[in-house]
Image (cartoon, rainbow, N blue to C red):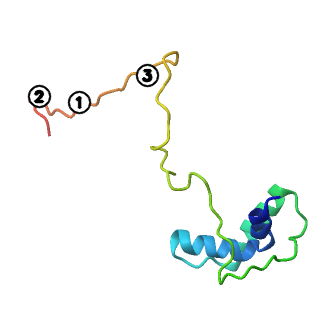
Amino acid sequence: EYKSFDKIVSRLPEVVKHFFLKQWHETISEENVNKAVELVMNHLGLKTLPQPILGSGKFPPVLKIRGLLHRDGTKGKLPPSDDSPVQEEKVINNENEDGEGD
């Protein structure tokens, strides 16, 4: 049914290592790999990982996290609807004692 998901879960430690290497260009420690795998297994309600489903590729299946590209939160946000309250922006005045700007 979900073949790529099953492949990712079956090879989770490898997938996690490869994900962090591609994302931050650094090798993750075994301790952090184990913690990430433990978190995923707890979330999925798994006691053990299934037998690895090996493909013909050189690398493990690619883990993609939707929305990770726009993690700063500025893209993809909808403008406020007409019935939502509008908040006024507070303007900070950077004038010195003479009334002139910095």
| Image position, residue 19 (x, y; %) | 62, 70
| Image position, residue 18 (x, y; %) | 63, 75
Residue type for callout 1: Asn
Number of the label disc, if any, that sits on residue 87 = 3
Most foreground residue, 18 or 60 = 60
Quadrant position of residue 30? bottom right
Which corner quadrant holds the N terminus? bottom right
Residue contact at pointers 1 and 2, CB within 8 angstroms: no
Most foreground residue, 47 or 14 = 14
Q: Secondary structure at mark 2?
A: loop
Which of the marked residues, 1 or 2, is nearer the chain's N terminus?
Answer: 1
Number of the label disc, if any, that sits on residue 69 = none
Q: Residue furthest top?
A: 83
Residue type for callout 3: Gln
Pointer 2 residue: 99
Quadrant position of residue 89? top left
Residue type for callout 2: Gly
| Image position, residue 9 (x, y; %) | 78, 67
Which of the marked residues, 3 or 1, is nearer the chain's N terminus?
Answer: 3
9 vs 83, left or right, is right
Instruction: Tell me what residue is drawn at x 52 percent, y 19 percent.
Output: 84
Number of the label disc, if any, that sits on residue 93 = 1
Q: Is the residue marked by circle 1 packed among few (<14), some (14-19), or many (20+) residues within 10 Å?
A: few
32 vs 79, left or right, is right
- Give the alpha-carbon distance from disc 2 to disc 3, as whole Å: 28 Å
Instruction: Tell me what residue is drawn at x 71 percent, y 82 percent.
Output: 56
- Give the alpha-carbon distance from disc 1 to disc 2, as whole Å: 10 Å
